Amino acid sequence: MLKKHLIYFFLLLSATSHSQIGGKSVYQFLSLVTSPRQAALGGKTVTIYDEDVNQGIFNPASINPEMHNQMSINYGSYFGEVTYGTAAYAYTYDRHVQTFHAGVSYVNYGNFDGYDENGQSTASFSGSEIALSFGYAYNVPYTNLHLGANAKLISSSLETYNSLGGAIDFGAIYIDEANDVNWGLAIRNIGTQFTTYSGNHEQLPLEIIFGVSQELEHVPIRWHLNLENLQQWNVSFANPSRASATIDGDSTEEKVSFLNNAFRHVILGAELFPKKAFNLRLSYNFRRAQELKIVEQRNFSGFSAGLGLRMNKLKFNYSYSRYTLAGNTSLFGLTINFQ
């Protein structure tokens, strides 16, 4: 009954919340994935509940004693000179107090050539952003419901402009042990700018994500289904390259159907051998596939794959995400168990 009430509450919240996607808010790097495992499963998995210390950055409800004294470092090169990385560490003070979690995410946009309004070359400049997070989770007594929260301090520097902000993430995970099903929900980036770039306050990239996953009984696979951007129903846009021409030479804007828009909220993923030393992962992100596909050409946008390999107290993770023919990303991660 408690699980049902929570689901109804968060669905109501998603229906009444208002946010923007696609570059209409500041600190967009907060929406990037936290680890190669996360990327290989589609980028927004909120139901993972195991020793993976990276997951605490994305859904604080996943913070648990199995993460105790583990540290992770992740790094990836996105497009051009853009680099991105995260790090996380968890420590269990005692079983009563539960586990504390700390994380950091950063992005470096590289160097840019500067020009004035007349096209004359000026000094080069760079840009970078970083977020520090501190999280804690709580297991509701006598239930399998886990609640968590992250507090984040955000700093952004773009050329000569600087901004400082803060945000809070809330998360919930319910574990159905009888059926090996996890239900998860995360409300991310509720916050504000403390100082702005030029005097105008801008929105943070608020997002609500709901997911479910299950490990099959006789097959070593855990499947994941996640619904992203639940704070905003219409996440589609008309792509000009897909406009159709009329007889008189005019063009008709692409029409995105109700079903097409609905699927753009869906991410499917699967993890083979989830509890073994070697794992394989595969996912498909419907929105990424629709937004980045090329007309009359198959380029497999939306697919991601990865693997994990544990050797004693070290675990290596890798992911490859397909965006376009010209741009794909690889993420590398290392987790160290200090116990």
Image: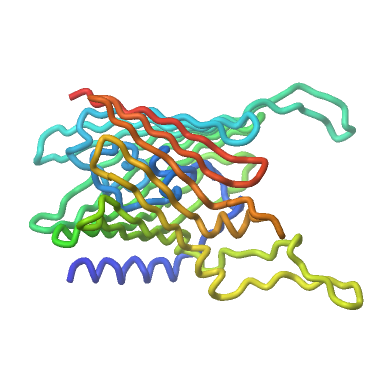
Indicate the quadrant containing the C terminus: top left, top right, bottom left or bottom right: top left
Taking 239 as reference, is 204 left or right?
A: left
Taking 178 as reference, is 147 left or right?
A: right
Q: Quadrant of residue 127?
A: top right
* Viewer-proximal residue among 272 and 131: 272
- Describe the colour scheme in one phrase: rainbow
Q: Total label count?
A: 0
Residue 118 in the image: above or below residue 290: above
- Residue at 36% over, 27% down: 334
- Residue at 31% over, 60% down: 212
Residue 79 percent across, percent down from the top left: 62, 36
Residue 225 percent across, percent down from the top left: 37, 60
Taking 47 as reference, is 86 left or right?
A: right
- Residue at 55% over, 38% down: 329
* Viewer-proximal residue among 286 and 192: 286
List the single residue furthest toward the front.
218
Residue 294 percent across, percent down from the top left: 69, 55
Indicate the quadrant containing the N terminus: top left, top right, bottom left or bottom right: bottom left
Q: Quadrant of residue 249?
A: bottom right
- Residue at 34% over, 52% down: 46
Taking 127 as reference, is 10 left or right?
A: left
Residue 38 percent across, percent down from the top left: 40, 44
List the single residue furthest toward the bottom.
247
